[in-house]
Image (cartoon, rainbow, N blue to C red):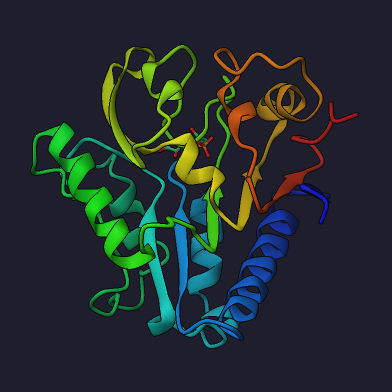
Amino acid sequence: MADRELHILPDNAGLLQAAAEFLRDTINDVLSTKSFCTIALSGGSTPKGLYERLASSGFSNNIPWSKLRFFLGDERYVPLDHPDSNYKMIRESLFKDRQPEPGTLFPVDTTLPAHEAAAAYERTLRNVLGNEGVFDIILLGLGDDVHTASLFPNTTVLEEKTAWVSDVYVEKVKARRITFTVPLINAARTIIFLVSGASKSAAVHQVINGQRMPQTFPAQLIRPRNGIIHWFLDQDAASEVK
Ligand code: 6PG
């Protein structure tokens, strides 16, 4: 199996449609051999349009929602109703027209002290995934500084080799985050990077073609051990890919 596949679409609308179709099809492939499908969702603004598309009738009716287990690949350490909360964004997009069934959407408990919130989330992950920690699907975004999830340049969490979830203070955004670690992400079967816009073209180039400098370009650390990375890019984001 190749370890990477590029999907380059002409514009943002085409990108979101292609990513939604791929996600729907991958979910149904997983469910042809498993009773449930585990999906880690990305935060930020890019995936919001994807989540709204998946929630629309064109997709929603072809997705077996009760068989999905949604987690957040990272979360801002704020209350779940805070404007910056990824959970809030996901509830207002992917679940704007439906209540998630009990046991299908797992928020980070940000009422706990940050280190305990990370440990509690890891316990929840182990309860659902088992100790192998293999996600069926992990959706990631990419910052223009080449961060992904909350794995930012020159932060200690980049060195984490065993924990699945860590809390980290990110100087750049002056905020604490709870994030999946590199080992957990790299255990996944299918990783989807969803990246849109010219502002990300240099970051995409650094990950796909650039010299390996993972402390500076953390998304370079994403190398699935037994999986594949699907890059969903619009033309603008892909403009520097060689
Ligand atoms: C977050 C995300 C983060 C995001 C990138 C890209 O919590 O913000 O997980 O890693 O994917 O920062 O964000 P945009 O899609 O908003 O550009």
Query: Residue at coordinates 44% horizontally, 21% vertically from top-left?
Result: 159
Query: Residue at coordinates 77% horizontally, 25% vertically from top-left?
Result: 205
Residue 151 in the figure: left or right of residue 5: left
- Eyeballing the image, is 36 above or below 138? below
Task: Evaluate whether residue 90 shows in this view.
Answer: yes
Q: Quadrant of the N terminus?
A: bottom right
Q: Nearer the viewer, residue 92 or 26?
A: 26
Q: Quadrant of the C terminus?
A: top right
Query: Residue at coordinates 74% horizontally, 35% vertically from top-left?
Result: 237
Whole-percent x, y for residue 165 in the image: 32, 40
Whole-percent x, y for residue 160 in the image: 40, 27
Residue 178 location, quadrant: top left
- Eyeballing the image, is 129 above or below 185? below
Q: Nearer the viewer, residue 156 or 139?
A: 156
- Eyeballing the image, is 110 above or below 157? below
Task: Evaluate whether residue 92 shows in this view.
Answer: no
- Number of residue marks: 0
Residue 163 in the figure: left or right of residue 153: left
Q: Nearer the viewer, residue 3 or 172?
A: 3
Query: Residue at coordinates 16% horizontally, 33% vertically from top-left?
Result: 114
